[in-house]
């Protein structure tokens, strides 16, 4: 049997993704399209956009760091998101937090996460010429620090307030604001266009720093631009639905294994398509099999955690 080309594999993934969307939109609809299309359609768009953002950002981050067991969450984005929610509940109360306009909360969360990452990039790459390894190390330290402060505050707040925080800590696609979804979609598309224009440069960067420089790549500028786009993608997706720690690791490696090529013109869309298939298929299982008795993020974190452990045991850092 002839080996399928990467483009053929991409087309097959697209067919599977479209099929998953059609099944999700039509299963047990009973013909009530005036309700089904807006309600389910919003969830489908949210899953596609968030999956797209996380998948593309993870592949890009792993290319820049030259390490396939790292994800953007190692920079502390998820921990910072939970710290923001915990501080708000601690000082304002859960009732006040819930009553704040979602668009205001979204803007604050995205601004805080992007400002944090850009401050790190400025200190490491502009104020002084430091390396990526230091960036990853500092990201881990900040992530641990944010998590420690969050745990401390959560131990002293009222138990009823803690229940609210637990709910916020799980990603959910069931109640996504249409306006925020539109803003997120526009940002993700704009950032993805930037990364797509850089796809051949990223191919060179994947060969290593010295090789990329010898090929004429402005390595420092490429790293800053790529990491900035990663920050925006992770910030808007996390602020929209909540944190999904291991999801990017899962879909990125599925893309590497299934596409049969390391070129970013194939791996980026492959990861985005697999992310959409995974989220939509997982949501179908949550709704039709578990009857909403579990969360999609729990299933994804479990599968992603197993993938992470398998990669560590295998020693597949590249």
Image (cartoon, helix red, strand yellow):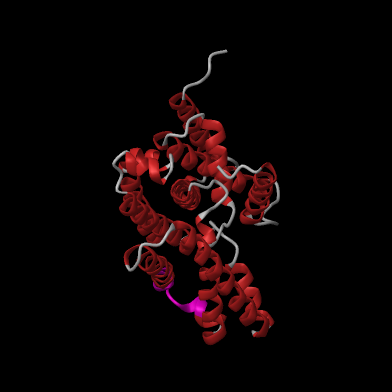
| Residue 77 versus residue 274 in the image, above or below | below
Place of residue 213 in the rendered image (x, y in percent of width and height, measured from the top left): 33, 44
Q: Is residue 195 left or right of residue 16?
A: left
Place of residue 98 in the rendered image (x, y in percent of width and height, measured from the top left): 51, 76
Rendered image quadrant of residue 158:
bottom right
Q: Give the position of the C terminus as an image quadrant.
A: top right
Q: Is residue 215 visible?
A: yes
Place of residue 128 in the rendered image (x, y in percent of width and height, measured from the top left): 35, 66
Q: Would you say the magenta stretch is mainly helix, strand or loop? A: helix
Rendered image quadrant of residue 120:
bottom left
Q: Is residue 31 visible?
A: no
Rendered image quadrant of residue 314:
top right
Q: Looking at the picture, tell me which residue is in the foreground, 169 or 160.
A: 169
The residue under the point 58% across, 57% down is 245
Q: Looking at the picture, tell me which residue is in the foreground, 163 or 199.
A: 199
| Residue 55 versus residue 175 in the image, above or below | above
The residue under the point 55% across, 65% down is 140
Place of residue 220 in the rendered image (x, y in percent of width and height, measured from the top left): 33, 54
Q: Looking at the picture, tell me which residue is in the foreground, 75 or 165.
A: 75
| Residue 228 within the segment the image draws in magenta | no
Q: Give the position of the N terminus as an image quadrant.
A: top right
Q: Looking at the picture, tell me which residue is in the foreground, 131 or 24.
A: 131
Per the rendered image, the range of residues in magenta is 97-106
The residue under the point 45% across, 45% down is 63
């Amino acid at each position: 049997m002839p080996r399928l080309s990467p483009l053929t594999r991409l087309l097959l993934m697209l067919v599977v993704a479209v099929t998953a969307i059609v099944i999700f939109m039509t299963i047990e609809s009973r013909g009530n399209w005036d309700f089904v299309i807006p309600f389910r359609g919003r969830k489908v768009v949210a899953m596609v956009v968030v999956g797209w953002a996380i998948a593309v950002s993870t592949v890009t981050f792993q290319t820049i760091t030259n390490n396939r067991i790292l994800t953007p969450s190692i920079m502390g984005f998820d921990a910072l998101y939970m710290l923001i929610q915990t501080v708000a509940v601690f000082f304002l109360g859960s009732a006040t937090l819930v009553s704040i306009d979602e668009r205001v909360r979204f803007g604050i969360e995205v601004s805080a996460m992007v400002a944090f990452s850009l401050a790190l990039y400025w200190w490491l790459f502009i104020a002084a010429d430091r390396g990526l390894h230091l960036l990853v190390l500092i990201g881990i330290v900040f992530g641990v620090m944010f998590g420690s402060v969050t745990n401390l505050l959560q131990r002293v707040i009222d138990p009823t307030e803690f229940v609210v925080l637990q709910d916020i800590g799980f990603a959910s696609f069931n109640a996504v604001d249409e306006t925020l979804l539109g803003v997120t979609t526009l940002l993700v598309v704009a950032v993805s266009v930037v990364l797509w224009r850089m796809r051949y440069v990223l191919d060179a960067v994947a060969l290593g720093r010295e090789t990329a420089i010898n090929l004429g790549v402005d390595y420092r500028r490429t790293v800053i631009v790529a990491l900035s786009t990663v920050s925006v993608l992770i910030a808007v997706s996390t602020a929209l639905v909540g944190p999904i720690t291991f999801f990017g690791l899962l879909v990125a490696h599925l893309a590497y294994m299934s596409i049969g090529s390391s070129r970013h013109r194939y791996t980026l869309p492959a990861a985005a398509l697999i992310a959409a298939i995974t989220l939509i298929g997982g949501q179908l299982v949550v709704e039709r099999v578990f009857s909403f008795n579990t969360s999609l993020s729990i299933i994804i974190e479990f599968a992603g955690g197993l993938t992470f452990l398998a990669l560590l045991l295998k020693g597949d850092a590249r």
